[in-house]
Image (cartoon, helix red, strand yellow):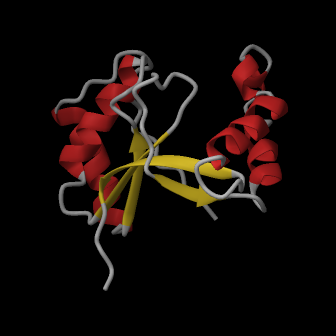
């Protein structure tokens, strides 16, 4: 039930400036999210880093902002939130297979790599399969 919002920004040339911020802010205004998931600043890909910084500005009023792991995340990615995905790993793999042009050339999108990554990070969360997240901000629930 996801909806794609396409910003039509040029691959490898995404900035952290006004154009990108406005696109993200527009989606935030339309969707009114409780949580934003974005790239980590600890990423080797310039588009990912710039998207992170633009999202932080655009999402300044959203109470929960979490950064996810990507294949280009650096060793400085330091998650402190782990979301259990045991029942979703097969669905995640199924969805990633839809991106055939990427899966054919990227070893990190293999079924084995996706599954083993969730197991690796699970060692920090009672040995469940997990998605790791860095917390930028999180509303404390009482």
Which picture quadrant has residue 14?
A: top left
Q: What x and y, as percent, mark residue 35?
A: 39, 63
Q: Give the left or right position of residue 15, taking residue 93 as reference.
A: left
User: Can you say whether 54 is above or below 15 in the image?
Assistant: below
- Is residue 98 something that shows in the picture? no
Q: Residue furthest bottom?
A: 142
Q: What x and y, as percent, mark residue 140?
A: 29, 74
Q: Residue at x 57, y 59 (%)?
A: 83
Which picture quadrant has residue 16?
A: top left
- Is residue 72 something that shows in the picture? yes
> Total label count?
0
User: Can you say whether 142 is above or below 122 in the image?
Assistant: below
Q: What x and y, as percent, mark residue 66?
A: 39, 52
Q: What x and y, as percent, mark residue 121?
A: 62, 43
| Viewer-closest of 117 and 111 | 117
User: Can you say whether 42 is above or below 84 in the image?
Assistant: above
Classify the position of the N terminus by image quarter: bottom right
Q: Residue at x 43, y 18 (%)?
A: 45
Q: Residue at x 74, y 48 (%)?
A: 92
Q: Give the left or right position of residue 15, taking residue 69 as reference.
A: left
């Amino acid at each position: 039930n996801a909806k794609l919002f396409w910003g039509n920004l040029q691959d490898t040339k995404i900035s952290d400036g006004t154009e990108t911020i406005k696109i993200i802010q527009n989606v935030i205004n339309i969707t009114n999210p409780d949580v934003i998931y974005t790239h980590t600043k600890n990423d080797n890909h310039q588009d990912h880093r710039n998207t992170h910084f633009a999202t932080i500005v655009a999402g300044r009023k959203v109470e929960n902002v979490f950064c996810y792991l990507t294949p280009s995340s650096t060793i400085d990615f330091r998650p402190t939130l782990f979301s259990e995905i045991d029942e979703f790993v097969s669905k995640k793999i199924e969805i990633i297979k839809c991106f055939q042009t990427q899966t054919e050339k990227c070893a990190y999108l293999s079924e084995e790599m996706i599954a083993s990554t969730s197991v690796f990070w699970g060692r920090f969360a009672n040995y469940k399969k997990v998605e790791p997240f860095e917390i930028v901000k999180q509303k404390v629930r009482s």
